[in-house]
Structure formats: C-alpha cells, structure tokens
Image (spheres, rainbow, N blue to C red):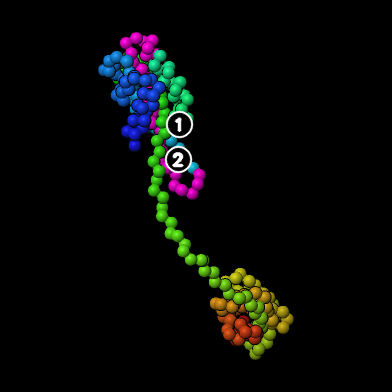
Amino acid sequence: MIDEVDRLLVEWVGSVLKGTPVSLAAPNGEVKGTGIYLYLMQLAEMPPARGGRKRPPLQMSLRYLVSASAEDPEEAHRLLGELVFAAMEREDTEVDFDPVLPAVWTAFGTAPRPSFILRVPLRRERRQPEVALVRSGVAVQSTAAISIHGIVLGPGGVPLMNARVECPALNLVSQTDHHGRFRFSAVPATPPPEFRATAKGKVLLVRADSRSLGGDPLVIQFDKLE
C-alpha cells in the first residue's frame, strides 16, 4: 500500500512540475542535475477513527521529506516553492515546516538544504464481522397474569395474623390480615409461582397448585410454631 502512495505522489509532482525528475531515494546528492526528492522518513501513529458501528480502519501517517536539487540554487528554490504551495492546496495531505535537524543531513552525507515534510494519511479498511440475518420474526411468549389469594394457618387450623407471605421470584410481599388471609393481585400462571411464608420465626415454602391457580384459596399451614 505504501508503494501505491509513492506512485501517486510521484505522479502529483510530475503534474505540478512538468518534466522534472522525481527520486524516492534519500537526498544525498548522488542524483545529479535538476530533480525533486520524495524521501519517506517516518511512519507515524494516527489516532483511530471513531463513529459508526463498523470497525474503524487501521491508519497511520507517512512523513515524506521533500527537497529540490538543481545546479542553479535559484532553480532549486523555484521548484521547491512551486511544490510547497501546491501541497498546501491539497486537502488530503498536510505540510509540516518544522526544520530538519542538522544531524539528519549529516547522516545523508550532504549539506542542509531547504525542505518541508509532507504528511500523507494511509488507511486500511478492516474486515467487518459477519452478522447473521434474522429471517423470521422474533417469537415472543407471554403468559397470563392471575390473582392468587390464600390463608395462613397455624397448628389446629388457627388463622395467623401478621404472617409474612412472599413471592421471591417477583419480589412481592403480602401481610396476612386478622383472618390470616393474603392476596397477590397479579402473578404469572406459568410456571406456578412459589411462596414463602414466615410466622413466629418459622419459614414454609409452598408452590401454587392447580386449584389455587383456578381461584381456590392457597392454604399454607404450619404444623408447629415455637
């Protein structure tokens, strides 16, 4: 992919400076005569793209050192000036005017020369995860809500007042009246709900049966209390 960027930049320079040779080599003075150097100096990190539900592309910034060469320094300056203004007109690149350190030119084995950095973004789209298509409607199961009433009895069939009756699955609580009666106005019929009765420190678990689901009172009886 980087080689494709190289090719496009070379073509772009050729469109700006007709007939001017372009080299991707380091500006080390080995190329004689007039020419433009497009030297890829660095691959720089770019923040990941955001937004949308798709996976963001992988991306980075290519930093090209751009300089000009000519036997006549004025001609080299003219070429560089034409090119930098053309680069500033582009919307898909950025121009960086930070000076290149002298040590870089020393490493190239040549004297420092006017230049600029051309930043070119490079992106690669990522493969999106496959999402299974829903080819049928969503099945929604519902169950009727019914009311359940009952009575809590102690030993000998004595109604228990102020006994606590809970439906844990629905986080519902009821308190028996002075006749030992309780009621839940809306509970699901299926599966049959389970109730927990507490009286004088004793706990009893009872599941609703077909008769209580059909309207008969649910009888919860403690055989022993304290």
Residue 12, percent from left and from top: 38, 26
Q: Which residue is drawn at 36% across and 17% down?
A: 68
Q: Which mark is residue 92?
A: 1
Cα separation, mark 1 vs mark 2, equals 17 Å
Judged from the image, the secondary structure of the residue bearing numbered disc 1 is: loop
* Circle 2: residue type: Pro
Q: Can residue 117 be seen in this view?
A: yes
Outermost residue toward the bottom in this view? 156
- The stretch of residues the image draws in magenta is 51-77
Q: Residue 119 carries which label?
A: none
Q: Is residue 80 left or right of residue 27?
A: right
Residue located beneath label 2 in the image: 48
Q: In this view, does 131 lie above or below 212?
A: above
Residue 156, percent from left and from top: 65, 90
Labels 1 and 2 touching (C-beta < 8 A)? no
- Taking depth in this image into account, of 33 and 43 the one nearest to the observer is 33
Q: In this view, does 169 lie to the left or right of 95?
A: right
* Circle 1: residue type: Asp
> Can you tell which of label 1 and label 2 is closer to the viewer?
1
- Looking at marks 1 and 2 on the same chain, the residue that comes earlier in the sequence is marked by 2
- Taking depth in this image into account, of 92 and 49 the one nearest to the observer is 92
Q: In this view, does 17 lie above or below 157?
A: above
- Taking depth in this image into account, of 100 and 73 the one nearest to the observer is 73
Quadrant location, the C terminus? bottom right
Q: In this view, does 95 lie above or below 51?
A: above
Residue 65 shown in magenta:
yes
